[in-house]
Amino acid sequence: MFLCFYRGEYVMKIIHRSVASEIERRGITVMSGFLQDTERVSLLEEAMQMQMSPAPRVINSRPVTQDFDMGFIDRQSKSYPRSIALIDDVEKTLTDVCCEYLEDEFIFNNCVVQRYKTSHQGILPHKDGVAYGGVVANVVLQGMGKFFLCEGGGFQEIPLWPGDLVVMAANGYGRWDNTPLHTISDISDERFIYGLRWRRV
Ligand SMILES: O=C(O)CCC(=O)C(=O)O
């Protein structure tokens, strides 16, 4: 019993280290099937009730090419309890897994739901911005699109499925001063994600 527990903890530490260092090395990792299907469906039900508006086309006086709808989640409010519990869970998982790389102040204080209809174009290649620290986490709730990392002049597709948790390095994560360049396009089935960020204020 003791041996099993000890080995379990030891194996978990190795898994944690490899996830944390993959984010450092590649700028991204995907935890496939992070959400179980029943949890995913219940979160989706809640997300579909949220008030959404078109994503801004200008950020910090700069035009941005992004085309989707979004709604903010206030973690202090009593609205959307399932989403808030999920955000707590993702934050706890990542602070555990990436503890060697994350600053003590790391917290998801900028949380949104994004809805991409099939008529939406998605987002052209971009980095999230130097204001976002630690890691950026996206949880795919439903739908399909094509997500690419844009590296060395090429595009590398990262296949994503409902239930996946995508984690990208952001400002201050090891050698990273921003997220890697990435893009989402070709929405073939209405898509919902949570986008969770730490905005340094
Ligand atoms: O929808 C996605 O999977 C990516 C979203 C994204 O790149 C962003 O919000 O900056």
Image (cartoon, grey):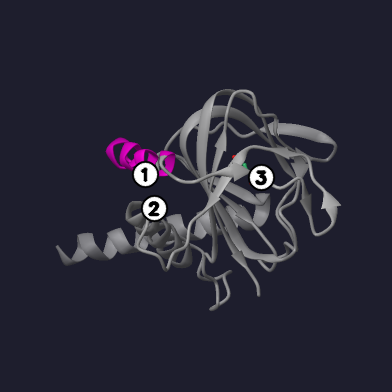
Residue at the left extreme? 1
Q: Which residue is at 45% across, 62% downward?
A: 91
CA–CA distance in space, label 3 to label 1 = 20 Å
Disc on the earlier residue, 1 or 2: 1
Q: For this rendering, which residue is in front, 151 or 49?
A: 49
Q: Which mark is residue 46?
A: 1
Q: Which residues are magenta?
A: 35-48
CA–CA distance in space, label 3 to label 2 = 20 Å
Quarter holding the C terminus is bottom right
Q: Residue 154, relative to residue 179: is it above or below? A: above
Q: Which mark is residue 55?
A: 3
Could you tell whether 177 is left or right of 11 in the image?
right
Q: Residue 178, relative to residue 102: is it above or below? A: above
Q: Are marks 1 and 2 in contact (CB under 8 Å)?
A: yes
Where residue 130 appears, as percent x and y from the top left, is 75, 63
Where residue 177 appears, as percent x and y from the top left, is 75, 63
Q: Hey, which quadrant is residue 156 in on the image?
A: top right
Q: Hey, which quadrant is residue 11 in on the image?
A: bottom left
| Disc 1 element | helix
Quarter holding the N terminus is bottom left
- The residue wearing badge 2 is 83
Q: How would you rate the neighbour count of disc 2 (Cα within 10 Å): few for under 14, some for 14-19, many for 20 or more?
A: many
Disc on the earlier residue, 3 or 1: 1
| Amino acid identity at mark 2 | Ser
Could you tell whether 35 is left or right of 61 in the image?
left
| Disc 3 element | loop
| Amino acid identity at mark 1 | Glu
